[in-house]
Image (cartoon, rainbow, N blue to C red):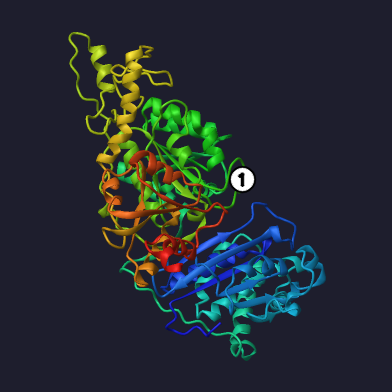
Amino acid sequence: MAKITPESSSVVVRFAGDSGDGVQLLGAQFAESTALAGADFSTFPDFPAEIRAPVGTTFGVSAFQINLGARRISTAGDQPDVLVALNPAALKVNLPLLHKGALILLNTDAFNDRNFAKAHIAADPRKTGELDDYQVIEIAISTQTLEAVKPHGLSKSDAEQCKNFWALGAVLWMFGRDRDPIVQWAQKKFAKKSPEILAGNLAALDAGHAYAETAELSAEIPQFAIGEAPMEKGEYRSITGAEAISLGLAAAGELADREIVFCGYPITPASSILHYLSKMGDLGVATFQAEDEIAACCAAIGASYGGKIGVTSSSGPGIALKTEAIGLGMATELPLVIVNSQRGGPSTGLPTKTEQSDLYQAVYGRNADSPLPVLAASSPGDCFDAAIEATRVAIRHMTPIFLLTDGYIANAAGPWALPDMDDYEPIEVNASPATVEDGDDPSLALKKAIWKRDEKSYGRPWVAPGMEGLAHRIGGLEKDIETGDISYDPANHQAMGELRAKKVASVADFIADQTVEQGPEKGPLVVVGWGSTHGAIWRAVNQANEQGMEVAQVHLRWLNPLPKNLKALLSNYDRILLPEMNFGQCATLLRDRLELDVVQLNKVSGQPFKIAEVLDAIRENYPGAKQAAE
């Protein structure tokens, strides 16, 4: 690999080791240092589903990838430029991902016959020629770590666990990063542990940095120089999608002047939202960990019935369990925000891998005709605004709503500009029924007032228990469209079904028209995406246009209902290409709703799209490409 110069636009770094090696911590702290240095970045935590797989095995490899640069970074990168491999299994799993000439840092202490056998490696790859096309630096990281922490009296097991800090110190030197923020973080992180643990980790950090700085390495390893990225002025911090959703929900509560009540049940990859929100009690957020998914959803509905903003969250299997309760939320006409952090399926599937395969579930996945609004976040930082928008729509239209993210967005991190909350409109709450005259029967008039829907949003007044004179009945049985009383009348059921459909359709009257994010307003090809495919599509379309093609990008936030102008907008292009991490669910939706021809690009591997995969599809589908190739 050529030496990285100050003019280099980006570098992709991947850390890999056993699940117990602290790889995720190593990567996350390097990402924090990157954010503080002013570079743009995007991360991809890639870890196994097992809590602790057998040490040294390939299926126990945990990895963390970060793409950092002095330009706009939209993905975690296609092919790593640098790999830090803490054992042979990590090298075996990740070597196919690297480009030729990449730099590999190996922990040689782990390269022994025992670990080769665990990873099913027949011969030492350092001697077989497998690594000849790469720049390999061999370091006895474990030995160096044990030597560095020896003065602090740690057990051998505790001492060996400090090797991630040794590796972090070395990489911080390679990129010219400051250690002080890491030291301050560690002092808080290990505050409740023994002083020896903190001292040992900091000693390892310093030792790794010093080792890399000496002449032993300086002639072999380039010190990468990545400048600051050109970003809009503001105060930035690193944020994951799960954290951004949590902050967005708390902000939505402030904007609506209502308490957020989050009711959840632990499930990968959605549990982080519960963890973050549980620490936000001082921001008007209450959390409840239920005994199961159904109870969590019903509790959130109960919170909304009580005048709070009920929120629940899960992933595909948990959403399946919540289905009947979600229907109850629709029947009661109460606001309910449902966050689905999608993962690989079906069934238990791939708990720690990403996918976009729950779109059908969100749009159609309930008994009877039970439409719900559905929107999707496109990046970790975008989750903040998406959470606010979902809450606003749920309250305005008095309906449950789906906010879709996925495992990639939930766990990945990127820079996020702290917003000015004065830029956000308050969330209006209609809690006062309008007066309805009904002859001489005040009781009937009151019932009609409670269930009188807004003429534009079809949302009813949010009447909570305890509001004087406004006692009323709710439940899952069909109700009279005017009074809310239980009704089995055929004509009334028809009217209620039409009302539920109009309520969701009316959301389109309040959302912005769809726009073209980049590229021409009319042309030969448009690439349409939704959710976390945004970054790969953005970069691929950007590169295609730099290469002389005329390609547009349209990225959907709203999936149900679709923006009113979407059909007219997409009809301006000769061909529509739609990459998504499922087998064509959004493509089917566009064909069904808009009668458009869509070319599918489907990936269901548990891994995000690479830029090259989208760019190759653009070239293949660009008019004249096939004839030119022939």
Quarter holding the N terminus is: bottom right
Q: Residue at x 50, y 78 (%)?
A: 177
Q: Residue at x 22, y 12 (%)?
A: 442
Relative depth, front residue between 235 and 379: 379
Position of 535 with respect to 1 (left or right) is left
Position of 464 with respect to 148 (left or right) is left
Q: Residue 368's spot in the image, x, y percent?
A: 44, 25
Query: Is residue 555 shown above or below 24?
Result: above
Say if residue 190 shows up in the picture: no
Query: Is residue 514 shown above or below 448?
Result: below
Q: Residue at x 31, y 26 (%)?
A: 499
User: At label 1, which amino acid type do we have?
Assistant: Gly
Relative depth, front residue between 552 and 48: 552
Position of 44 with respect to 445 (left or right) is right
Query: Is residue 70 shown above or below 610?
Result: below
At numbered mark 1, what does the secondary structure look like: helix, strand or loop? Answer: loop
Q: Residue at x 62, y 91 (%)?
A: 215
Say if residue 432 shows up in the picture: yes
Q: Residue 512's spot in the image, x, y percent?
A: 26, 48
Q: Residue 111's spot in the image, x, y percent?
A: 76, 73
Pointer 1 local density, CA inside 10 Å: few below 14, some 14–19, many at least 20: some
User: Badge 1 is on which residue?
Assistant: 349
Report which quarter residue 593 is drawn in: top left
Relative depth, front residue between 101 and 250: 101
Q: Residue 625's spot in the image, x, y percent?
A: 41, 65
Report which quarter residue 105 is drawn in: bottom right
